Amino acid sequence: MPGAASPVALTPAAAELIRSLRGRHGPLMFHQSGGCCDGSAPMCYPAGEFRTGSSDVLLASLTVDEVPEPVEFWISKSQWELWKHTMLTVDVVPGRGSGFSLEAPDGVRFLIRSRLAP
Protein backbone atom coordinates (compact mmCIF):
# COMPACT_ATOMS: atom_id res chain seq x y z
CA MET A 1 0.00 0.00 0.00
CA PRO A 2 2.69 2.49 -0.96
CA GLY A 3 1.67 6.11 -0.58
CA ALA A 4 -1.49 5.22 1.33
CA ALA A 5 -2.12 5.94 4.97
CA SER A 6 -1.72 2.91 7.18
CA PRO A 7 -4.98 0.99 7.57
CA VAL A 8 -3.99 0.23 11.19
CA ALA A 9 -3.70 2.66 14.09
CA LEU A 10 -3.10 2.29 17.82
CA THR A 11 -4.84 3.94 20.74
CA PRO A 12 -2.57 5.44 23.41
CA ALA A 13 -3.55 2.57 25.73
CA ALA A 14 -2.53 0.00 23.12
CA ALA A 15 0.80 1.77 22.52
CA GLU A 16 1.49 1.79 26.28
CA LEU A 17 0.73 -1.92 26.57
CA ILE A 18 2.96 -2.64 23.57
CA ARG A 19 5.83 -0.76 25.27
CA SER A 20 5.33 -2.84 28.42
CA LEU A 21 5.14 -6.13 26.52
CA ARG A 22 8.18 -5.19 24.42
CA GLY A 23 10.17 -4.64 27.64
CA ARG A 24 9.25 -8.11 28.87
CA HIS A 25 9.22 -10.15 25.66
CA GLY A 26 11.39 -8.38 23.08
CA PRO A 27 10.23 -7.50 19.55
CA LEU A 28 6.53 -8.08 18.91
CA MET A 29 4.06 -8.83 16.11
CA PHE A 30 0.28 -9.02 15.74
CA HIS A 31 -1.80 -11.47 13.79
CA GLN A 32 -5.49 -10.90 13.08
CA SER A 33 -7.37 -13.95 11.91
CA GLY A 34 -11.01 -14.40 11.14
CA GLY A 35 -13.06 -16.89 12.98
CA CYS A 36 -15.09 -16.89 16.12
CA CYS A 37 -14.39 -16.15 19.74
CA ASP A 38 -10.86 -14.89 20.35
CA GLY A 39 -10.01 -15.77 16.75
CA SER A 40 -11.53 -12.40 15.87
CA ALA A 41 -9.25 -10.51 18.28
CA PRO A 42 -5.73 -9.41 17.32
CA MET A 43 -3.18 -11.70 18.91
CA CYS A 44 0.18 -10.34 20.05
CA TYR A 45 3.21 -12.63 19.91
CA PRO A 46 6.98 -12.34 20.13
CA ALA A 47 8.10 -11.36 16.60
CA GLY A 48 8.41 -14.45 14.42
CA GLU A 49 6.70 -16.79 16.87
CA PHE A 50 3.51 -16.95 14.80
CA ARG A 51 4.38 -18.37 11.41
CA THR A 52 2.88 -16.37 8.59
CA GLY A 53 2.57 -17.66 5.06
CA SER A 54 0.91 -17.20 1.72
CA SER A 55 -2.53 -17.00 3.35
CA ASP A 56 -1.49 -13.87 5.33
CA VAL A 57 -0.97 -10.21 4.42
CA LEU A 58 1.44 -7.80 6.13
CA LEU A 59 -0.99 -4.94 6.64
CA ALA A 60 1.22 -2.51 8.55
CA SER A 61 4.55 -2.01 10.27
CA LEU A 62 3.52 0.06 13.27
CA THR A 63 5.82 2.63 14.81
CA VAL A 64 5.48 2.93 18.57
CA ASP A 65 7.37 5.57 20.57
CA GLU A 66 10.14 4.00 22.68
CA VAL A 67 9.95 0.71 20.77
CA PRO A 68 13.09 0.44 18.62
CA GLU A 69 11.63 -1.69 15.82
CA PRO A 70 8.32 -1.64 13.96
CA VAL A 71 5.58 -3.95 15.21
CA GLU A 72 4.27 -5.90 12.23
CA PHE A 73 0.51 -6.32 11.92
CA TRP A 74 -0.48 -9.36 9.87
CA ILE A 75 -3.98 -10.38 8.84
CA SER A 76 -5.32 -13.45 7.10
CA LYS A 77 -6.09 -12.79 3.42
CA SER A 78 -9.67 -13.96 3.86
CA GLN A 79 -10.24 -11.59 6.78
CA TRP A 80 -8.64 -8.67 4.92
CA GLU A 81 -10.92 -9.35 1.97
CA LEU A 82 -13.87 -8.72 4.30
CA TRP A 83 -12.30 -5.70 6.06
CA LYS A 84 -10.38 -4.03 3.22
CA HIS A 85 -12.69 -0.99 3.24
CA THR A 86 -12.12 -0.28 6.94
CA MET A 87 -9.61 1.51 9.09
CA LEU A 88 -8.58 -0.68 12.02
CA THR A 89 -7.64 0.66 15.45
CA VAL A 90 -5.97 -1.60 18.00
CA ASP A 91 -7.28 -0.84 21.49
CA VAL A 92 -7.11 -2.45 24.93
CA VAL A 93 -10.00 -3.34 27.23
CA PRO A 94 -10.20 -4.98 30.65
CA GLY A 95 -10.82 -8.69 30.62
CA ARG A 96 -8.92 -11.77 29.80
CA GLY A 97 -9.20 -13.37 26.40
CA SER A 98 -8.70 -17.10 26.10
CA GLY A 99 -5.76 -17.27 23.79
CA PHE A 100 -2.02 -17.21 23.57
CA SER A 101 -1.73 -13.45 23.18
CA LEU A 102 0.98 -11.97 25.38
CA GLU A 103 -1.29 -9.53 27.23
CA ALA A 104 -3.61 -12.25 28.62
CA PRO A 105 -1.83 -12.60 32.01
CA ASP A 106 -2.18 -8.83 32.56
CA GLY A 107 -5.98 -9.05 32.79
CA VAL A 108 -6.51 -7.04 29.60
CA ARG A 109 -6.94 -7.88 25.95
CA PHE A 110 -6.35 -6.22 22.63
CA LEU A 111 -9.35 -5.67 20.40
CA ILE A 112 -10.05 -4.10 17.03
CA ARG A 113 -12.25 -1.08 16.58
CA SER A 114 -13.12 -0.44 12.96
CA ARG A 115 -14.69 2.24 10.84
CA LEU A 116 -15.20 2.64 7.12
CA ALA A 117 -12.18 4.07 5.36
CA PRO A 118 -12.64 7.53 3.81
Image: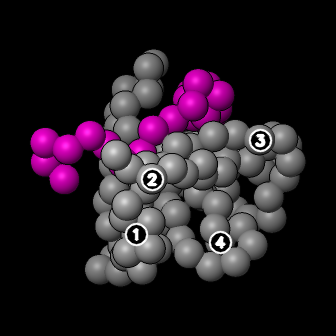
Frontmost of labels 2 and 1 is 2
Are the two marked residues, 1 and 4, in contact with CB atoms closer than 8 angstroms?
Answer: no
Front label number (1 vs 4): 1
What residue sits right under mark 4 in the picture? 39
Residue at position x 66%, y 51% from top? 111
Dots 4 and 3: beta carbons under 8 Å?
A: no
| Residue 8 drawn above or below residue 20 | below
Residue that badge 2 annotates: 116
Separation of marks 4 and 3 at Cα, in angstroms: 16 Å
- Which stretch did the figure color magenta? 1-22
Direction from residue 107 to residue 5 in the image, left or right: left
Q: Nearer the viewer, mark 4 or mark 2?
A: 2
**Which circle's residue, 3 or 1, is located before the other in the chain?**
1
Check disc 1 and report its element: helix, strand or loop. Answer: helix
As drawn, which residue projects farthest toward the left? 3
- Mark 1 sits on what residue? 80
Q: Which residue is mark 3?
A: 93
- Would residue 117 appear left or right of 93 to someone viewing this image? left
Choose the circle earlier in sequence order: 3 or 2.
3
* Mark 4 vs 3, N-terminal side: 4
Q: Position of residue 5 (x, y in %)?
A: 26, 40
Please say whether residue 49 is visible from this viewpoint: no
The percent coordinates of residue 77 (x first, y second) are: 37, 76
